[in-house]
Amino acid sequence: MLTPAAALRRILDRMAAQGPLPAERVSLREALGRALAEDLRATRSLPPFDNSQMDGYALRAADGLRAGARLPVSLEVFAGDAPGAVLPPGSCARVFTGAPLPAGADAVEMQEEVSRRGGVAVFRRRAEVGRFVRPAGADVPEGAVALPRGSLVDPAAVGLAAALGRSELPVYRRPRVAILPTGDEIVPIDRAPAPGQIVDSNSHTLAAAALEAGAVPLVLPLAGDERGALRAALEAAAGADALVTTGGVSVGERDLVRATLRDAGARIELWQVALRPGKPFAFGAWGRTAVFGMPGNPTSAWVTFELFARPALRALAGLPGSGRLLLPARLSRAQEKPRHLAVYLRARARRTRGELWLDPLPTQVSGHLTSAVNVDALAILPAGVARLSRGAPVEALWLRAPPSPSDRQ
C-alpha cells in the first residue's frame, strides 16, 4: 500500500501533467477565490497623481526648513479637485486626504502639527521632502504587473482590479465534479428507507466539500451494485473534470466500481492507501476526467476527499496546495493504533499556556456521522508507531483556524 504522502504525490503529478483548466473571463465578484489565468497589468498608475496622505498643509520643504515657519495659505485643495493648481512660492495650501498636490509642493504637514492664525499657517516642526505625500505610481506604476498569473483573487485583489478599471478578470475555470453515490443499501434523501436501507448522506457531504474547495458539484442519481446500472450512471459523468464515487471500491463481491470503471476505459492508477479511515481509496483517469473512488463509510469518504480530492481540484483550478494549514499540536490523551497505518483522528482544538492541544472526538468510528461534525483538525498519527502518549507532538491538518493565543489560558 502507498503512504498517504506518496498517494498524494502521484495524484498531483497527474494534475500537473494535465495542467490547469481553461481560462474564462468573469466579473470581479465571480472571480473571488479563484486563480488569475493571466498577469494583471496596470493600464494606469496608482495613485494616478501626487496626492496628500493627510488632512493638513502642502508646502515646498525649502520654505519650511525650520520649526516655527510661518506661511500664508494661498490655496485650498479638496479630494476630487482636478490636478493642476500651482502653489505660489513662499506659501502653503490647505489640503485634505486624497487631494491632488499642487504643482511645486513636495511635502505635507498634518494639521495636528500646524496652528492656523487667520490666513497664516505656523508649522511646529521642520518640513521634510516627501512627508505625507503619495507620489503618482507609488503603489503600482503604469505598465507594471499588479498581480501575477496564478494569484489568488481575494477581496483586496478585487479592489485592486477595480482601482485599475477592470470590471472582469481572466481566471481558471472552476472544476466540474460529478459525484456518484453507489450501493443497494442507500436511498435518496426524500425517500423513507426500507428495512436494511439507509438514506444517502455521502453525496451531500461531498457536494458541500466540493463547493468549499471551489468546484462545481453535479450529484448523479444513485446507482445500485450492478454493472449495468453503474455503467449507465458513469455515462452521465462524461465530460466532467473529476468523478467522485462513494462505495464499491473495496474487496467484497459487490464492490464493482473499479471493475466497471476499467470496463468503461478508465485507468486505475492506485488502490489502497496505508491510512485510517479510508484505506480502500482508489484514483485513476478516465480520459481527461480524474477519478476518485472513495470508501462508502461517511467519514472515510470525507477524510479521503480532504486528503486527496481537495488538493487535486485546487490544482485543476490553478490554486496551490490544499488551502489548509499543517501545524504542530499535542495530543490530550494517549492513543493506540495499527503500526503500519497513518491514522487521521478527528479532533477539536484548544490552546493552553500557549500550546495547541487536540482532543480527539469520543468516537472515531468511520460510520458515525457525528465524528466528522465541527471538527477543528485532523491529528496525524504517523505510521511506524503503535502508541503515542499523552502530550505527544503530532502534525495536524487544520480544517478551521487554530484557537488564538490568550494570556488567560
Image (cartoon, rainbow, N blue to C red):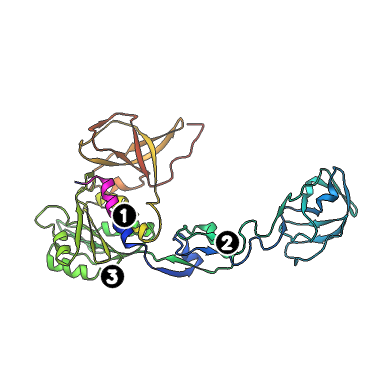
Question: Where in the figure is residue 193, as x and y percent of width and height?
Answer: 19, 60
From the viewer's perspective, tell me whether residue 274 is left or right of residue 158.
Answer: left
**Closer to the camera: disc 3 or disc 1?**
1
- Quadrant of residue 238 in the image? bottom left
Crowd band around label 1 with a 10 angstrom C-alpha radius: few (<14), some (14–19), many (20+): many
Question: Where in the figure is residue 359, as x and y percent of width and height?
Answer: 34, 36
Crowd band around label 2 with a 10 angstrom C-alpha radius: few (<14), some (14–19), many (20+): some
Crowd band around label 3 with a 10 angstrom C-alpha radius: few (<14), some (14–19), many (20+): some
Using the rendered image of the protein, determine whether residue 127 is visible from the camera's viewpoint: yes
**Closer to the camera: disc 1 or disc 2?**
2
| Residue sitting farthest toward the front | 143
Using the rendered image of the protein, determine whether residue 361 is visible from the camera's viewpoint: no
Whichever of callouts 3 and 2 sits on the residue coming sooner in the sequence is 2
Residue position marked by numbered label 1 in the rendering: 12
Residues shaded magenta:
2-11
Residue position marked by numbered label 2 in the rendering: 144
Residue position marked by numbered label 3 in the rendering: 239
| Measured Cα–Cα span from mark 3 to mark 2 | 38 Å
Asked which secondary structure carries label 2, the reply is loop
Which amino acid, mark 2? Ala
